[in-house]
Every structure is written in C-alpha cells, then in structure tokens.
Amino acid sequence: MKLLYAFGQFIISEWIWSVTFGQHHAAIAIVLMIIAFLYMRIPFVRAVLFAFGAQLFAWIMLGGSALVMAHQIFGVTYDQAEPSTVLHALAASFLLGVIYILFEMLFFYMVRAWLPRSYEQMVKAAAICNLIAAFVVYLLLPPM
C-alpha cells in the first residue's frame, strides 16, 4: 500500500510540476516535434496535427491520472507537510518528459493506422523532442 501511496504522490507532484515550473514543456516539445516531423518529410499539416495531438493527449492523460488515479482510486491527496518527491529540478523535468513520452507512445499506438512513418520512428522522434524540451525547461528555470 505504501508503494501505491508513493506512486500517487509522485504522479501528483509531477502534475503540479507540469502546471507550474514545467508549464513550457508542452509548447517547446510541440515546436521541436513539428521540426522533427518536417525533417522526416511529413507534410506540414500532418506534422502539426500529430505533434499537437500527441502533446494534448499526454497532457490530458497526466491530468486525468493525477486526479482520477491518485485521488479517487488510491485516496491520495497532496500533503505539503510531507517531503516532496521532486528531489531536483532537473530530475523533475526529465521525469515529466518521460511521462509525456509514455503517454505519447500510447497515442501513436492508437493512431498507428494513420501514421505517415513507422510507429518506432514517430516514438523515437517524440522521445528525443520531449527529452530536449525537458532540458530546455530546466535551463529556463530561475535559480532555486
């Protein structure tokens, strides 16, 4: 039970990170994904749709996970008195990127019939873009 509670705290902490310090992650990742998809010779409109759709899906899934899974199923609420599960800003940024990558893998799997390139190529491009976006977000943070 403690493991589920810790996982719930982690999800809630990452969601809070995504709407506060990591708020620029999605926008940066969308721009990077559009550039990567154009480099992969995907038409502009489809590149924008896949980049925006993947980020929107990941953002909705993270928010839904934080609200539904953590709070409703496990009964976890965010407790500021407890030590934060975010140990370092770089780790929080990269973990947010990894969460986005996992949800985007699910998105690309669900729309794989309409992908202009293979599933693996799209996931690799999205993963690289999300990790770069996480690092850029970390560099844009004010000194803590």
Image (spheres, rainbow, N blue to C red):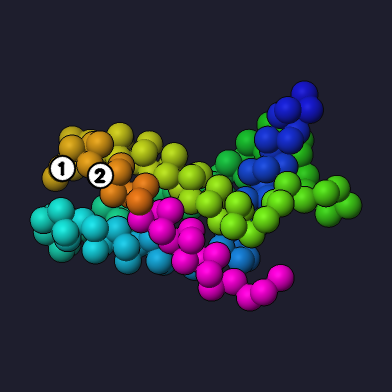
Residue position for label 2: 122
Q: Is residue 49 visible?
A: no
Pointer 1 and pointer 2: residues touching (CB < 8 Å)? yes
**How packed is label 2: few (under 14 Cα within 10 Å), some, or many (20 or more)?**
many
* The furthest residue to the right: 81
Please tell me which residue is depicted at 44% across the width and 39% down the height of the picture: 102
Is residue 69 located in the magenta-colored stretch of the structure?
A: no
- Residue 106 position within the rendered picture, expressed as x and y whole percent measured from the top left: 38, 36
* The one of 45 and 137 positioned closer to us in this rendering: 137
Residue position for label 1: 117
Q: Secondary structure at mark 2?
A: helix
Please tell me which residue is depicted at 41% across the width and 48% down the height of the picture: 57
Q: Quadrant of the N terminus?
A: top right
| Direction from residue 20 to residue 98 in the image, left or right | left
> Disc 2 marks which amino acid?
Met
- Residue 112, by quadrant, is top left
- Residue 49, by quadrant, is bottom left
Q: Which residues are magenta?
A: 129-144
* The furthest residue to the top: 1
112 versus 24 height, above or below: above
Provide the major secondary structure of the magenta segment. Answer: helix
Please tell me which residue is depicted at 64% across the width and 43% down the height of the picture: 11
> Disc 1 marks which amino acid?
Arg
Q: How many marks?
A: 2
- Residue 130 position within the rendered picture, expressed as x and y whole percent measured from the top left: 41, 54
**How packed is label 1: few (under 14 Cα within 10 Å), some, or many (20 or more)?**
some
Q: Is residue 34 visible?
A: yes
Q: Earlier in the sequence, mark 1 or mark 2?
A: 1
